[in-house]
Image (cartoon, helix red, strand yellow):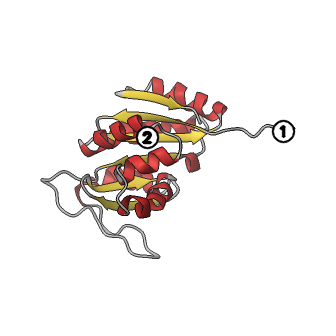
Amino acid sequence: MTQIARESSIIALYETHSAAEAVIKELAKAGVEMKNVSIIGKPFHTEEHVLGFYTAGDRMKFWGGQGALWGGLWGMLFGSEVFLLPPIGPLVVMGPLVGWIAGTLEVAAAGGAMGVLAAALASIGIPKESALKYELEVKSGKFFVLAKGTPETIERAQGVLSRSGALHVSVHNA
């Protein structure tokens, strides 16, 4: 009987977008496949204006004051979207988390107790209590980087993330 490798997740929390972006580049150098990595955070602060706009078949046309920050990751990570999630507000999501959030929008719209972000995290095996805490951290302006994969991938990512100056690093086993 063959055993199927179960995927786990690791999440690291950062105070700034630039710290989160730097660790994504380090994960890539360490051989973590970018198709397994996501970043999420609020795209702008209240004193800034339009982040940008995106149209089907095009790339981001204007990045506003954060162009250098988000634009550097646009081509590295697979899938990118800007969501407006009450009560969090606008969020930039890059990586496979885009699909997980989109998949939970219908459930959340039907009156789920958790917010969309927490529900998306819970759907991939993050414990509900942790998912709710991550949602609150993002709402407060923090950024997190999530990597999902086999135990070997998570071990490689943990080596990078534990040296990255993250506010918090947690492994969540499936």
**Which residue is under mark 2?**
145
Q: Amino acid at mark 2?
A: Val
* Percent of width and height locating residue 130: 40, 35
For residue 44, which numbered disc appears in the image? Answer: none
Residue found 48% across the figure and 60% down from its top: 103
Find residue 140 and report its horizontal and vertical position in percent: 23, 41
Image location (x, y in percent) of residue 42: 28, 50
Query: Which residue does the image show at 39% across and 35% down from the upper left?
Result: 129
Q: Write down the residue under mark 1.
A: 2
Q: Could you tell which of marks 2 and 1 lies nearer the N-terminus?
A: 1
Q: Quadrant of residue 102?
A: bottom left
Instruction: Name which residue lies at 79% across and 37% down.
Output: 3
Q: Secondary structure at mark 1?
A: loop
Judge by depth and name the residue closer to the eye, 123 or 16. 123
Q: Amino acid at mark 1?
A: Thr
- Asked if residue 167 lies left or right of residue 56, the reply is left
